[in-house]
Image (spheres, rainbow, N blue to C red):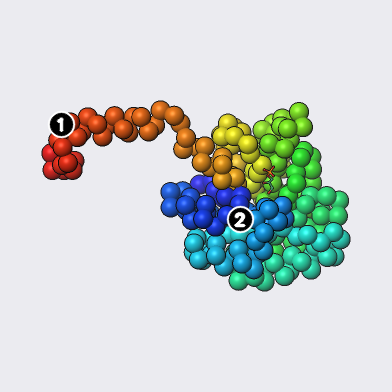
């Protein structure tokens, strides 16, 4: 089954969607944490208490040197949760990923804007690859196409990396990459909400209620 994540630091929204979706965990990035003014030391315990001990969390390094990223990754990995360390797939980041993998730490290569960039991160041993679908689209390129090419490269070369597609503005982008058979996806709260939001659904349910009450008043189905 595809691993489904929410890309947010909003604990209430995580609790809400955890009621109705099989969430594998939560992804964050430095901008998400900064916007919410919530650090990992407050966020992670709250998320773990909502999602339970099996949940997986993603935290990004903010160091700017390879050695700094490696040291930061070790610290993140020591947190008492199932952590995946996010590292930008830059030249420096790829150098860090190679070293971090020698430590046996789970790594996601992030900020992927092209298939070749993701492919290099996969060759360096990244466990997950995060192509930024909407940001690629917003630059006039083809985000879904990049994910398709990257998945093709992974398959052709027998690599173990999993695509965890990120950056979505609408459900069509999410559906298009899920149709490619990717292993994982992270949705922002508004796009997760849109997944339920077909305008015909509630009127259909309301009509069932109306018909039922006209015929059977307050009886339940098995009492009719
Ligand atoms: O975590 C990185 C990715 O999810 C970015 O999404 O919406 O800022 O393009 P967005």
Question: Which residue appears at 31% of the width and 32% of the height?
Answer: 206
Ligand 1 - quadrant of the structure image: top right
Callout 1 secondary element: helix
Q: Earlier in the sequence, mark 2 or mark 1?
A: 2
Inter-mark Cα distance, 2 to 1:
47 Å
In percent of width and height, residue 144 lies at 66, 33
Q: Give the quarter of the image for residue 99.
A: bottom right
Q: Is residue 223 above or below residue 139?
A: below
In percent of width and height, residue 5 lies at 57, 50
Question: Which residue appears at 60% of the width and 71% of the height?
Answer: 80
**Residue 138 appears in view:** yes
Residue topped by disc 2: 9
Question: Which residue appears at 75% of the width and 46% of the height?
Answer: 111
In percent of width and height, residue 203 lies at 36, 29
Q: Residues within 10 Å of mark 1 (few under 14, many from 20)?
A: few
Counting labels gives 2
Question: Which residue appears at 69% of the width and 46% of the height?
Answer: 130
Residue topped by disc 1: 215
Callout 2 secondary element: loop
Q: Residues within 10 Å of mark 2 (few under 14, many from 20)?
A: many
Q: Nearer the viewer, residue 59 or 120?
A: 59
Tell whether circle 1 marks a residue whose Cβ is less than 8 angstroms from ligand 1: no
Say left or right for 188 vs 49.
right
Q: Give the quarter of the image for residue 43.
A: bottom right
Residue furthest out toward the left: 224
Say left or right for 223 vs 14.
left
In percent of width and height, residue 198 lies at 46, 31
Q: Give the quarter of the image for residue 132.
A: top right
């Amino acid at each position: 089954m595809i691993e489904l994540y929410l890309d947010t630091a909003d604990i209430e929204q995580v609790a809400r969607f955890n009621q109705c979706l099989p969430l594998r965990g939560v992804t964050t990035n430095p901008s998400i944490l900064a916007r919410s003014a919530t650090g990992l030391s407050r966020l992670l315990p709250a998320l773990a208490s909502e999602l339970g001990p099996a949940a997986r969390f993603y935290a990004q390094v903010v160091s700017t040197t390879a050695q700094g990223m490696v040291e930061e990754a070790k610290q993140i990995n020591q947190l008492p949760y199932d952590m995946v360390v996010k590292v930008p797939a830059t030249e420096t980041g790829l150098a860090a990923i190679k070293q971090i993998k020698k430590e046996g730490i789970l790594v996601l290569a992030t900020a992927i804007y092209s298939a070749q960039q993701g492919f290099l991160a996969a060759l360096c041993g990244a466990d997950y690859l995060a192509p930024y679908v909407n940001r690629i689209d917003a630059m006039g390129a083809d985000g879904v196409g990049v994910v398709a090419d990257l998945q093709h490269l992974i398959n052709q070369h027998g690599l173990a990396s999993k695509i965890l597609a990120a950056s979505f503005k609408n459900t069509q982008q999410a559906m298009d990459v899920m149709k490619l058979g990717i292993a994982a996806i992270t949705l922002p709260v508004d796009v997760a909400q849109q997944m339920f939001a077909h305008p015909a659904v509630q009127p259909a349910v309301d009509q069932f209620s109306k018909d039922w009450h006209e015929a059977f008043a307050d009886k339940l189905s098995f009492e009719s």
